[in-house]
Amino acid sequence: MKQQEPRRWILELTFKAVKYFLLALAGCAIAYIVALVLECTVITEVIEIAAEHLLPRALVLMGCLVATAVITESVRY
């Protein structure tokens, strides 16, 4: 009988978080490009301000989550 692999919940959480973060980033980029083409300056300014304030913090959080997942997985084995 084959042994079951232990659940790697933090690794799964990290993959999902990175996936949805990149999808949100792509969505914001598409919305920004569409707003630029349609000359909606209000929307472009809102996206720029949000990206300036939220993107660095989100990148730090993603980095911490990835580092935690890597450390816990390497300690486990």
Image (cartoon, grey):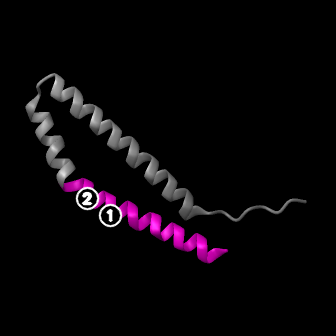
Which element type, helix, strand or loop, lies under badge 1? helix
Of all residues shown, which one is farthest toward the right?
1
Q: Amino acid at mark 2?
A: Pro
Q: Position of residue 60 (x, y in %)?
A: 32, 64
Give me the disc on residue 60.
1
Residue appearing at x 46%, y 64% in the figure: 66
Q: Residue furthest top?
A: 38
Residue interval drawn in magenta: 53-77
Instruction: Reply above or below: 27 against 39.
Output: below
Based on the picture, tell me whether residue 47 belongs to the magenta stretch: no
For the C terminus, give its image quadrant. bottom right
Q: Amino acid at mark 1?
A: Val
Residue 61, image x, y percentages: 35, 63
Q: Give the residue at x 39% y 63%.
A: 63
Callout 1 touching callout 2 (CB < 8 Å)? yes
Which x, y percent locates residue 11?
55, 61
User: Where does label 2 land, which residue?
Assistant: 56
Residue 45: where, in percent of width, then height?
A: 11, 40
Tell me if residue 57 is in the magenta stretch. yes
Q: Residue 43: which quarter of the image?
A: top left
Q: Where, quadrant-wise, is the N terminus in this rendering? A: bottom right
Task: Name the residue rendered at 60%, 73% in the picture.
Answer: 74
Q: Residue at x 42, y 46 (%)?
A: 20
Residue 19 vertical position relative to residue 67 in the rendered view, above or below: above
Alpha carbon separation for disc pair 1 and 2: 6 Å
